[in-house]
Image: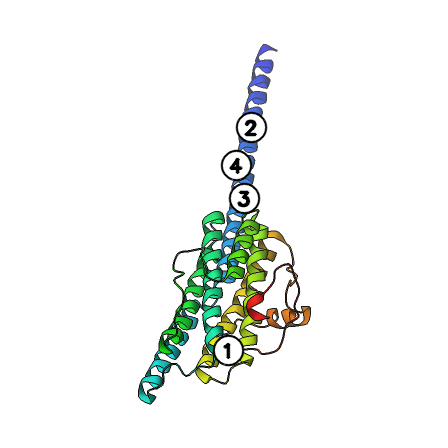
Amino acid sequence: MLMKMFFGSIILIALAVLGAGIFRNTQASTTQIGAEAQSNEGIQNNRVETYIEKDNWQEDTSELNAQIDQAQSNNEQLGVTGELNEAEAQGLLFMYEEEKLVRDVYSKLYGTWQLQIFQNIASSEQTHMDAIKGLIETNNLADSDISHPGTFSNPDLQALYNELITRGSQSMDEALMVSAAIEEIDILDLQKYIAETNNPEIQNVYNNLLRGSQNHLRAFSRMLLNKTNQTYQPQFMSQAEYQTITSQSNQGKGNGMGGNGGQGGKWSRSGSQ
């Protein structure tokens, strides 16, 4: 009788140990599967963000630089300097400051939120500034000393910069919405100045900047949706023009869009009135 009880106890203990081992293995497997799933999700999110942030920066840079070199060569051969009318000259000076505003805002927002898209597009905006600067220098225009980040000679742009930084510092959501709004403003101003000049070199540069800004608007809209599940609503251009831009693929070479966007929103755009 005691032997039977002894062997019975041994069997029960063995079953308990076996069961505990199975439970630990099952728990470990479940934990591993969960960790792998989380890792895969992280990899997928990184791929999505990498895709969203890839917006033809280098192609934009090379084409713009080639155009500036050609413009300078043409002017040297023809002996042309300072042949712009007043509207064209003022347009170049204003757009140079506006592109600087865009670059400075994105650089500041990258420092606040460490979101790579801000740094990427800030680099692209530096290229836009360099392109316009080339035309300013080629045509011997005197521009203001606004080299320090966050400083502008145009008081409206200074006020706009201050407001954008205040809004963009509130949250990452607000920073992305502010950035998309900036690209709307840039697009509408470029369209205005394209329509006001017959100078082919200025038109070519502006059209390239326009394509870049349309790419940037798409990038910020997608990032906002990816990060916050919010659909961006245009604040300055018409809904129809916004949908036309965002339904297109990123643009490299080719003609930029024309057309007039609707005005409105929270900020004035004195440079494009």
Residue named by callout 2? 20
Q: Nearer the viewer, residue 79 or 174?
A: 79
Residue named by callout 1? 87
Q: Can you say whether 127 is above or below 115 in the image?
A: below
Q: Nearer the viewer, residue 56 or 270?
A: 270
168 with respect to 152 (left or right): right
Mark before the other along the chain sequence, 3 or 2: 2
Residue named by callout 3? 33
C-alpha separation, residue under disc 4 versus residue under disc 3 = 9 Å
Within-10-Å neighbours for mark 3: few <14, some 14–19, many 20+ = few
Position of the C terminus, as image quadrant, is bottom right
Residue drawn 45% across and 49% down? 111
Whether residue 84 is visible to the viewer of this picture, yes or no, is yes
C-alpha separation, residue under disc 4 versus residue under disc 2 = 12 Å
Residues at circles 1 and 4 in contact by the CB criterion of under 8 Å: no
C-alpha separation, residue under disc 1 versus residue under disc 3 = 65 Å
Whether residue 252 is visible to the viewer of this picture, yes or no, is no
